[in-house]
Amino acid sequence: MSELRADLARWGLDGRQVRERVYTAATPRERERWHALWLLDRGWTAAQVATALERDAHTVGAWLADFRRAGPASVAFEHTGGPPPPSTGSSGPR
């Protein structure tokens, strides 16, 4: 079993579930990170994944390290800068 497969199993996931998350991710950034994990699970190297996704290999390695440490929660995108997202509620001023 590959090291990534062991990590996926630790978090209750398999390759099929990772692929499914590629298609159901809430944001493009999450989708990209799940896609990277899926490709890594398929035997791609971090350098190959980085080339395919037009990212730096260190970035892909950081995503993998984050996943190993914190699991699926590490893949979720957290807005860290810029203006807040627009409100969708109806409780604002009229």
Image (spheres, grey):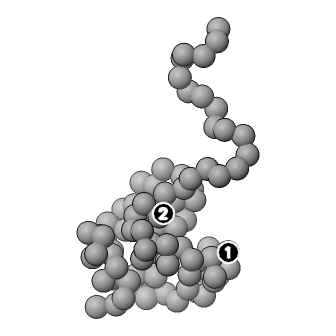
- Residue at the right extreme of this rendering: 82
> Helix or strand or loop: what does disc 1 sit on?
loop
Q: Can you identify the residue that label 1 sits on?
A: 54
Cα separation, mark 2 vs mark 1, equals 18 Å
Question: Which percent across, then down, holds residue 2?
Answer: 34, 90
Apparent side of residue 54 relative to residue 29 in the rendered image (left or right): right
Question: Which percent across, then down, holds residue 6?
Answer: 30, 83
User: Does residue 43 appear in the picture of this structure?
Assistant: yes
Q: Decide: few, some or many residues near mark 1? Use Cα within 10 Å; few <14, some 14-19, many ≥20.
A: few
Q: Is residue 5 above or below residue 70?
A: below
The amino acid sitting under disc 1 is Glu
Apparent side of residue 67 relative to residue 63 in the rendered image (left or right): left
Q: Nearer the viewer, residue 89 or 19?
A: 89
- Which residue is painted at 47% across and 64% down in the image? 74
Q: Can you identify the residue that label 2 sits on?
A: 75
Apparent side of residue 93 relative to residue 67 in the rendered image (left or right): right
> Helix or strand or loop: what does disc 2 sit on?
helix
- Which residue is painted at 27% across and 76% down in the image? 9
Number of numbered tags placed on the structure image: 2
Question: Which percent across, then down, holds residue 39?
Answer: 47, 79
- The quadrant the C terminus occupies is top right
- Residue at the top extreme of this rendering: 94
| Between discs 2 and 1, the one toward the N terminus | 1
- The quadrant the N terminus occupies is bottom left
Question: Which percent across, then down, holds residue 52?
Answer: 61, 78
Q: Nearer the viewer, mark 2 or mark 1?
A: 2
User: Does residue 38 appear in the picture of this structure?
Assistant: no
Q: Quadrant of residue 49?
A: bottom right
- Which residue is painted at 52% across and 89% down in the image? 45
The amino acid sitting under disc 2 is Val
Q: Decide: few, some or many residues near mark 2? Use Cα within 10 Å; few <14, some 14-19, many ≥20.
A: many
Q: Which mark is residue 41?
A: none
